Amino acid sequence: MFPLLESISTVMKAGYEAQLAVMAQITRTAVDGMEKAINLNLSTAKASLDASLNSSQQMMSATTPQEWLLLRSAQVRPTVDSALHYGHHMADIVSCTQAEIAGVAAAHVANASRKIKAA
């Protein structure tokens, strides 16, 4: 056949395979990040349910309005702390996932640039 067409076809195939590998790596990284976020959401939901049940039991044990208010005000801080912890943990997950994806893309661009300069 035509050697030029065969070499172009080989180069195109190699480029396609490289892009496919990069997309697979980016997708795996994104799915890993989603898995971490889902696990965080599940553990947060379980902890929230436990805290809510505990809080309800404490509130039911109050015998005076003042005791009820004291119990309720004591429960606010742990709830806020839990929400802040969740937000920080989710931000860490998103940040790490974004950094990993950016690293994969940067490595691909650097590799492609080297190949273009070498050609």
Image (tube, rainbow, N blue to C red):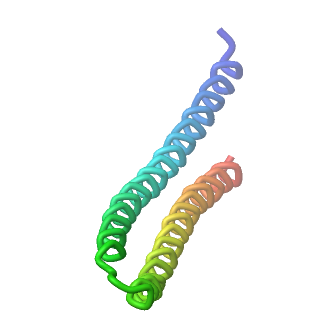
Report the front residue among 73 and 89: 73
Locate residue 73 relative to residue 14 in the image: left or right: left
Report the front residue among 31 and 67: 67
Locate residue 47 relative to residue 18 in the image: left or right: left
Tell me what residue is drawn at x 54 percent, y 48 percent: 26
- The image position of residue 61, as x and y in percent, is 29, 77
Report the front residue among 117 and 16: 16
Is 101 located above or below residue 80 in the figure? above
Is 79 located above or below residue 4 in the figure? below
**Which image quadrant for residue 53?**
bottom left
Is 8 located above or below residue 66 in the figure? above
Tell me what residue is drawn at x 42 percent, y 51 percent: 35
- The image position of residue 92, as x and y in percent, is 50, 72
Tell me what residue is drawn at x 33 percent, y 82 percent: 63
**Which image quadrant for residue 101?**
bottom right
- The image position of residue 69, as x and y in percent, is 46, 86
- The image position of residue 68, as x and y in percent, is 41, 83
Tell me what residue is drawn at x 38 percent, y 89 percent: 67
